[in-house]
Amino acid sequence: MAKRISGKDVAADVKASVAAAVRTLPGQPTLAVVLVGDDPASEVYVRHKVTDTEEVGMRSIKKTLPATATQAEVEALISDLNQDDEVDGILLQLPLPNGLDANQAIECIDPDKDVDGLTEASAGRLVLGKTGLRPCTPTGSVILAKRALGDNLSGKNVVVIGRSILVGKPTALLFLAENCTVTIAHSKTKDLPGLCRTADILVPAVGRPQMVKGDWLKPGAVVIDVGINRIDAPERGEGKTRLVGDADFADCEPVAGHITPVPGGVGPMTRACLLQNTVKAACYRRGWTLPDGV
Amino acid sequence: MAKRISGKDVAADVKASVAAAVRTLPGQPTLAVVLVGDDPASEVYVRHKVTDTEEVGMRSIKKTLPATATQAEVEALISDLNQDDEVDGILLQLPLPNGLDANQAIECIDPDKDVDGLTEASAGRLVLGKTGLRPCTPTGSVILAKRALGDNLSGKNVVVIGRSILVGKPTALLFLAENCTVTIAHSKTKDLPGLCRTADILVPAVGRPQMVKGDWLKPGAVVIDVGINRIDAPERGEGKTRLVGDADFADCEPVAGHITPVPGGVGPMTRACLLQNTVKAACYRRGWTLPDGV
């Protein structure tokens, strides 16, 4: 029976490490969060990020623009934050209201302050193996795999299912940087179950509820489930739903060595890694030594 | 017995397509080549690039700086070329003389003119699947694989051996963009021969002479050999050397379906793809429609 890797617990550890690191820094890192419009879900996410930031001893700035803001206004705000020497990280809450070009706005963020790791330069630095800010969900996935197998992942076979720019591709590149042998699979892959059975670490990230079955796994494999899917749950009552991952948890649990639950797996790590990135951004930009544990 | 894929012939076809494309354009694309110092090999490479460019009907500009040039002088020259609206592509011939920082100089190149595809932004655009200029050797490798298997590579298993920023990683990303299932292997990979036997397309790119043996191949596999290694060739006389790839050609030829020779395989493609990139850079930047065949 697989051990569950609690993303909640690991995220709490990461948060504690960040808080400890922040106390050793010569100054206080600052994260600026930009919210455009009044999407209720986005408001909740932004509130969480502000609270998280302050809880670990960093400063947070929240900037809001109305849903009627123009592209130029969004970009001007980002440009101000780029130039503000007090600001270490800039997070543009997505999605933007209709009519605004998110990609173009993201590209305005100074890559040195790009704590979401979404700009072209950040993606390029990842490929080129340069110092830079890596996307949060992929970083969290690697941390969870290390919690299962230890810090040395060298030589492990990793299969990432999905090649999205937000998760699949950066996750593959991050495991590659850990000296894993990495395969990127997707909808055109032939014999996906057979390929998955070669994986020491399997990372489904496609958004297909409960796709990965127990007989897709090498016994003892680590499953880092990035999928978050809402499905009907009539057993909970009429019209009720629940969250499930891309792995069929009940079916995989007897075969896997370690598995992350959904919810409570990769999800909480994304928030924690944003804090880590803010510390990194501050250290790189201000020439501070990066503290241990970050 | 494998069919040999002649990089020379395919490169000639690419060059002919570029020449045909250039004739249909509303203006003449211009490639600027920057040579710093007087390394004889670099001078030869630059001469080839100038000749190639003019042969396909494009304009070439050669800019030279002495070996004593400072970093600031190199960057100022690049900056001038960035601002010169007549210049579509900028190629900085590498290596630079000792004491100059090549990475820093490359980052000065406007990504829209980065015909070598070496800047952070170009690497990022590749990961993010955005329009941009891709590195030449990886692009040439994909073209050669298509020559063997046809334009539709969807679902093919590709194993890239090597994870360099110049070849391994961009090659993997380009085959991924062709809907291949891609594995990146390297020195830490376990059972490399066994992994290679899963490949429909094998791309060794590590710089280890004749490492890949015939029994590493699935019968009928396509071998795109990116390695170029100089080894002793006493059979040619005392002190003589010859070029070999990362694949043991004689051993692989009876098993492979298609194989590229070294020399005369991937090598000539790199030069041809530079021309293709110059046309692309001109079209993207000037808002021209990209002609067919480029």
Image (cartoon, coloured by chain):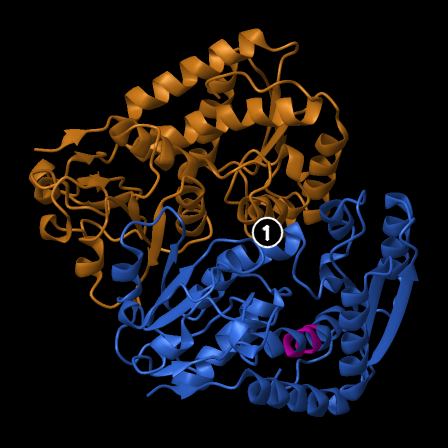
Chain colours: A blue, B orange
x, y (%) of residue A264? 57, 81
> Is residue A57 at all visible to an observer of this figure?
no
- Where's the N terminus of chain A, which quadrant? bottom left
Q: Residue farthest to the top?
A: B23
Asked if A169 appears above or below B260 in the picture, the reply is below
Of the pair B42 and B29, the residue shown nearer to us? B29
- Camera-side residue: A186 or A228? A228
Callout 1 secondary element: helix
Query: Which image quadrant: the C terminus of chain A?
Result: bottom right
Q: Residue furthest front?
A: A238
Q: Please check the rendered image and state whether residue A274 is part of the magenta-colored stretch, yes or no.
A: yes
> Is A107 on the left or on the right of B289, as rendered?
right
Point out residue A140 in the picture as x, y percentages from the top left corner: 56, 74
What residue is rendered at 69% in x and 22% in y?
B287
Residue A261 counted in the magenta span: no
Q: Main secondary structure of the magenta part?
A: helix
Would you name the residue on which mark 1 appears?
B103
Among the 4 quarters of the image, the one containing residue A180 = bottom left
Asked if one can make out residue A41 in the rendered structure from this viewpoint, the answer is yes
Q: Quadrant of residue B175?
A: top left
Tell me where residue A4 appears, x and y as whole percent.
44, 86
The image position of residue A214, as x and y in percent, is: 31, 73
Compared with residue B145, is residue B56 higher up or lower down, i.e. above or below? above
- Name the foreground residue: B197 vs B61: B197
Q: Nearer the viewer, residue B125 or A239?
A: A239
Magenta residues, start to end: A272-277
